[in-house]
Image (cartoon, rainbow, N blue to C red):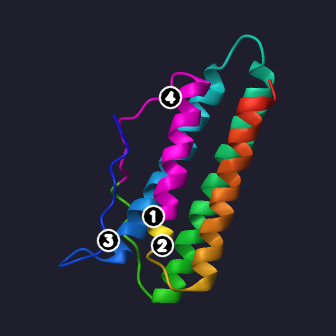
Amino acid sequence: MALQRLSRPKGGEKADELVGILVAELLNASVLTHKLHLKVSGTGSYAQHIALNEFYDAIKDGADSLAEQYQGHKMIILDTDKALMDSYILTSVDDCLDYLEKLYNLISEVQSMMTCSSIINEMDTLKSTINTAKYKLNFLN
């Protein structure tokens, strides 16, 4: 299942909804990568195991931070019940690398709609977390 592309807010759709969807997907990413972390095996699996562990911890914390900052900035409570890839399963590190690239692009897309510098910076930190994980999963095995 492919990650759906988000559209810019129009009509009844608001940036708040898109941030809620992004936070839900970041939390989903933590679960997906945690599951993969538990089943990697073979050559390079220890490095992958550690890289995935670092990622799922960091991305969960990053999702929490983004949600709290956004909610504080906008003085709203986000709806985080709509992850885009609820049924997505990562069966390999290659699947994970593809998923991380899509997640990075999703963050960039939502980030382009933001005007608050602290929210933009938080999203940059999330993208840095993804880049670090991609590097470790791709080159440190």
Element at badge 2? loop
Per the image, the residue denoted by label 2 is: 112
Give the residue type that dot 3 points to.
Arg
Q: Residue at x 74, y 43 (%)?
A: 54
State yes or no: discs 2 and 1 in contact (Cβ < 8 Å). yes
Q: CA distance from mark 2 to mark 4?
A: 28 Å
Q: Earlier in the sequence, mark 4 or mark 1?
A: 4
Q: Earlier in the sequence, mark 2 or mark 4?
A: 4
Per the image, the residue denoted by label 3 is: 8
Q: Earlier in the sequence, mark 3 or mark 1?
A: 3
Element at badge 3? loop
Q: Quadrant of residue 21?
A: bottom left
In the image, 45: left or right of 106?
right
Per the image, the residue denoted by label 1 is: 109
Q: Residue at x 36, y 76 (%)?
A: 15
Specify the segment rendered in magenta: 83-109
Nearer the observer: mark 4 or 1; the answer is 1
Give the residue type that dot 4 points to.
Leu
In the image, 140: left or right of 76?
right
Q: CA distance from mark 2 to mark 3?
A: 9 Å
In the image, 6: left or right of 48?
left
Nearer the observer: mark 2 or 4; the answer is 2
Pick the front one: 91 or 113: 113
User: How many numbered marks appear?
Assistant: 4
Q: Earlier in the sequence, mark 4 or mark 3?
A: 3
State yes or no: discs 4 and 3 in contact (Cβ < 8 Å). no
Q: Measured from the top left, where is residue 110 in percent x and y? A: 45, 67
Element at badge 4? loop
Q: CA distance from mark 4 to mark 3?
A: 28 Å
